[in-house]
Image (cartoon, rainbow, N blue to C red):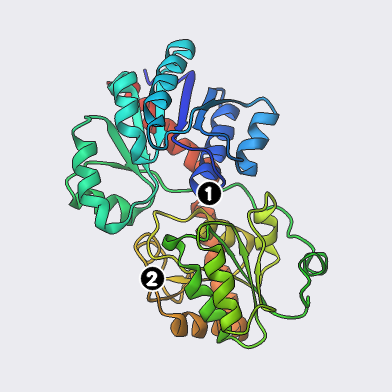
Amino acid sequence: MTMSPRRVLLVLSEAGTGGMQAMVGVLAGGLADAGVEVHLAAGGDAPMPAAVTEVVERGATVLHRLPSPRGAGLLQWTLGLRTLCRKIRPEIVHGHGLRTAWPIAIVADRRRVLVTCHGLPPDDLERSARLVRRSRITVAAVGPGLADALRRAGLDCWLIENGVPDAPLATDRDLLATSLGIDPSTPLVVQAARLSPQKDPLTAVAAIAAVPGATLLLLGGGVLEEDVAGLARSLEVTDRVVIAGWSPEARSILGAADVVLLSSLWEGQPLVLVEAAAAGVPIVATDCPGVGDWLVDGVEALLSPSGDPAALAKNIGRALDDHVLRDKLIGAGALLAERHTAASMVDRHIDCYQALLAR
C-alpha cells in the first residue's frame, strides 16, 4: 500500500520574493489542500511572495523563521533547523536550493529527505553536483535542461517541473499606467526578475532603447539597480524604463503587459514564464540554459542569444507588431500552461514523497 505523507517540512535557506520562494508557496498550498500538515522554514526576516503569505494567512501552512544563514550564521541556521525537526517530527523534509542539502542531511533522516535544485550557474554545476552526491540524499531538478545537466555532472536526480495556479485578473492597464506615470497607449514590456547579474537587466534596458515607443517595466530590486538606472540615463530612455521594485501584484501586472521579457544568462525553469503563458501574454527571452531547453523558439517564445540586446530588441518588435505571430505565441502558451498546472506539480511532489516513504 502506497503511503502519503501526513506532515512535511519545506525548507528555504533564505526568505525572499524570488521564483523559488513563490513556487514553494504554491506547493505548500497544494499540499495543504491534499490534507498534508505543512510547515515552512525560512532563514532571515525578508518579505515573502504573495503565494507564501496567502497560505500562511489562511492557516494552510505554519511559517517558521530561522536565523539568516549568511556567513557565520549557517551554524545557527542549522541548529535552528535541527530543533524544529525534533519539535514537529516531519515525515518528509524537503529542501529548496542545493545549499540546503548538507545541513538537512546532518539534522534529518536522509532516507526521507528531498532537495530540489531550482537553478545553478553552469560553471558551478559540476562542483555542486560532486559535493551534494556525497550527502547521499535524493535530489530533484526543476526543468528538463537542469536535470540533464546535473545528470551529466554525475548526480542522479528526479525531474519536477514548475506549475502555477490559474492566472488572476489582469491589472487595469489605465490604472497601472497612471500609477507608473506612463502613457497607457504605449506598448508595455514587463520583466519580473531580480536586478542581478544572473538576470542581466542591463541587456533588457539596452534592448528597449532600440524599440521606439515601448516602455520597460522592471518588477524587482537588487544589486544592479543603480547600474540599470545609470544605463537608462546614458541611453536617454529614463522616460521608458520604470524600476518599480517587487510587487505582491506581480502576476496581475504580467497580465496587463504586451510582452513578458526575460533577459537571463541562466535559469532552472523560470516560474515567471509559466505565469506569462497562463496569462496569455507573448514571451520574449534569451536562449539561455533553463529556457531554451524547454521552450521552442517561434512556438512558445521568441528566443535570442544571451547578452545580445539587438537580437532581443528585434524579437520584442516582432512580438509587438506581428499580430499573426502574437496569436501563435499566445495559443502555444495556453497549451504550455495546461501542461504546467499547480495541481500537476503538487501531484508530482506527492509521488516523490511516497517513493521516499516506501524505502
| Callout 2 secondary element | loop
Q: Which mark is residue 287?
A: 2
Residue 22 percent location from the top left of the image: 55, 44
| Callout 1 secondary element | loop
Residue type highlighted by circle 2? Asp
In primary-sequence order, the first of circles 2 and 1 is 1
Residue 26 percent location from the top left of the image: 56, 40
Whether pointer 2 and pointer 1 mark residues with C-beta atoms closer than 8 Å, the reply is: no
- Please give the name of the residue rendered at 64% of the width and 57% of the height, measured from the top-left corner: 245
How far apart marks 2 and 1 lie (CA) works out to: 21 Å
Vertical comparison of 212 with 189: above or below: below
Q: Looking at the image, which is closer to me, 50 or 73?
A: 73
- Please give the name of the residue rendered at 32% of the width and 33% of the height, measured from the top-left corner: 101
Residue type highlighted by circle 1? Gly
Q: Is residue 260 left or right of residue 77?
A: right
Mark 1 neighbour density, 10 Å: few (under 14) some (14–19) many (20 or more)? some
Placement of the N terminus among the 4 image quadrants: top left
